[in-house]
Amino acid sequence: MALHNLLGPFPVETFLSDSFSQYWANEIDRSVLAPQRRHTCAYGSFPRPSRIDANHDIVLVLNGTSSGVCPPDLEWILPDRAGLVIADAVSAAFTSNIDFDRTDVLCWSWQKALGGEGGHGMIALSPRAQARLKASGRKPVPRLMRLHNPDGSVNNAFFSGRTISTPSMFAVEDIHSALDWAEACGGLPALLNRVANNYAVLADWVNSTPWIDWTCTNSAARSTCSITLRLVREQLAAGEKGDVADIAARMIRLLEAEGAAFDIWSYGDGPPGFRIWAGPTVEADDLAILCEWLAWAYSETCEASILPEAMVVRHGYFPPSKPRAVQPRTESACPQTADLENPPPQTLADCYDGILFDAAGVLIRENEALPGAADILARLNVSGQPYYIVTNISSGSETAIFARLRRAGLPIPAVDRIVSAGGVARHCVLEELAAGRLVSYVGSAHAAHEIFGKHPNLYGADTVPTFDTLVVLDDEGFDFKRAADNILSTFHRRLVQAGEMPRLIAANADIIYPKKNGSLVFGPGIIGPMLQAGLSSFGAPPISVEFVGKPGRAIFDECIARAGTNRLLMVGDQVDTDIKGAKAAGLDSLLLRTGLSNCRELRQDENGTPEYVAKNLGQIFDDSLFPYQRSAKHFNITN
């Protein structure tokens, strides 16, 4: 009703976070209601809002019952917007605090949160939405959806109790009874408290159970009443038969046969698992009993026990890493000659105390796991061999990067396995701010504030005319061209006026990186070469860039400190960052051909020659890899 009566004057931005938001987006297109821009994301997450036009309408779902996802907040919706915000609040009503100042149309059902009869709903319009109705006049919509009188005026009687078609009087009395019960409980605050208690019961169970995990790994975007859980394949015992979908189906059939739970199947478009309603009409004690039933069904379905070494503590409850004394690296980590009394290791992974993986191009491409990556990490989880994700991704904190990689399907057990360039840069930036220097950043404000926190001397590179220090983060969510132009002008101005240039710290030093379709794009590391080229005609000295991310030494020193050893193997796809950085830190390296080395030939010098070259990640666990034979000038990766 809201979409048909109100959309049309402006383009609309739809946020697709669950099955119903997809339904509304399809309805907008099918009925040609307005030009539409869809914001999408991986299943189990909420799309990141960026560059929303205040003149556009917005359509979103406040609580996704199919995906268990809700918007982390609505702060990105401007108070002085011209467009309308139309919100599907079906299951959010009575279960969450709704920011009414940032919504214009709220639609909710009678039954979802309070357990009334289904098939009936409510609609609430803000003054801004009512003004849109008056201005747009009558529209050719189905009679049951019309909010206008025949003369085009707003049908106010509709909002004072008059109905177009008589609903069930049992349903009317049912919702009155439910509202009386809610008031007797203590009103909305009491309902929200019941939801919070229910969520806490399930959260405690999930965080202590190794074979189950949240479908939504980002706790800020996780629904507290529409609980969606998935079985974790890599944590199932080796002796179990069948895939996770079959295991979930057998568990649910057992629970239904025992009368313990009904209709807890995950949605068809979600990963295999369970969907549990934890709204205010559900008792926390019953959910605790349900958790026991789920554990029973799992033990009945899976004959083998869970391997102790496969146990993983969930996000938010991670024990801190235990630092160890650094063990010195021998001249060659992997023996080159056989010893009859001490036979050589069977795989390359056995040659090292730990493995470092680059993220983009090695484990993921954009937000999808590369083939085999999840299986490799799962194998390392079971074996207990330490590994770390060493990434120049600087679009958020290490916790945010951890959540992003988990959403991509990578079974990384703890956030301390993430070593990011942004995290390493944080110490340098905080020192600069403490000294009273103006720090500018290349990247989004969200990323900078998440990594460094908010500070009055911290600005975006495209927003200020001068700065003392520039830190290069990521290229997501901001105007790269505008920032580059402003940086060039600032460096030139400082060169002319003071004969010096600002300090340049590169967290993300990637000059290029691959997209999902195989194309290449420039990364934020291009800032340094661009400045050098642009200022050379003005007599500028060589631009000095402090690399804290790869290929800088700082990020590898952090890995060595966390692992407690320098007997580490760096697995990467870029010679200039991964391989050269590892070599400079005294670590062995493996160049993977699934990423940016898929060109015919790479020019090398001794500092950029890897110890190993592999076609795929799986080769670190078989005996097909041999030390790479160095060439004085170059090597051909097709050889």
Image: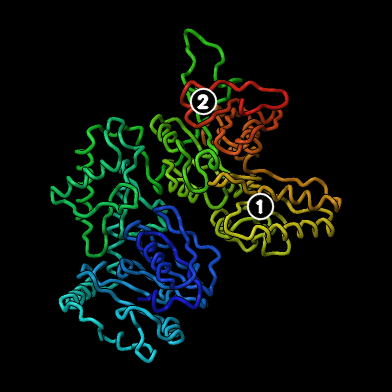
Tag 1: Cα neighbours inside 10 Å, few (<14), some, or many (≥20)?
many
Residue 32 vs residue 164: left or right? right
Disc 1 + disc 2, Cβ < 8 Å: no
Separation of marks 1 and 2 at Cα, in angstroms? 34 Å
Residue at which label 1 appears: 471
Residue 544 lies in what quarter of the image?
A: top right
- Where in the figure is residue 339, as x and y percent of width and height? 51, 9
- Where in the figure is residue 616, as x and y percent of width and height? 51, 31
Residue at which label 2 appears: 352
Q: Residue at x 57, y 33 (%)?
A: 593
Residue 595 lies in what quarter of the image?
A: top right
The mark nearer the N terminus, 1 or 2, is 2
Q: Quadrant of the N terminus?
A: bottom left
- Where in the figure is residue 556, as x and y percent of width and height? 59, 36
Q: Residue at x 32, y 58 (%)?
A: 66
Tag 2: Cα neighbours inside 10 Å, few (<14), some, or many (≥20)?
many
Residue 638 vs residue 157: left or right? right
Q: Residue at x 73, y 62 (%)?
A: 466
The vertical placement of 570 against 459, above or below, is above
Is residue 424 visible in the rendered structure shown here? no
The one nearer the camera, 57 or 528, is: 57
Callout 1: SS? strand
Residue extending farthest left? 258
Give the amino acid at mark 1.
Answer: Val
Q: Quadrant of the C terminus?
A: top right
How many marks the image carries: the answer is 2
The vertical placement of 484 against 244, above or below, is below
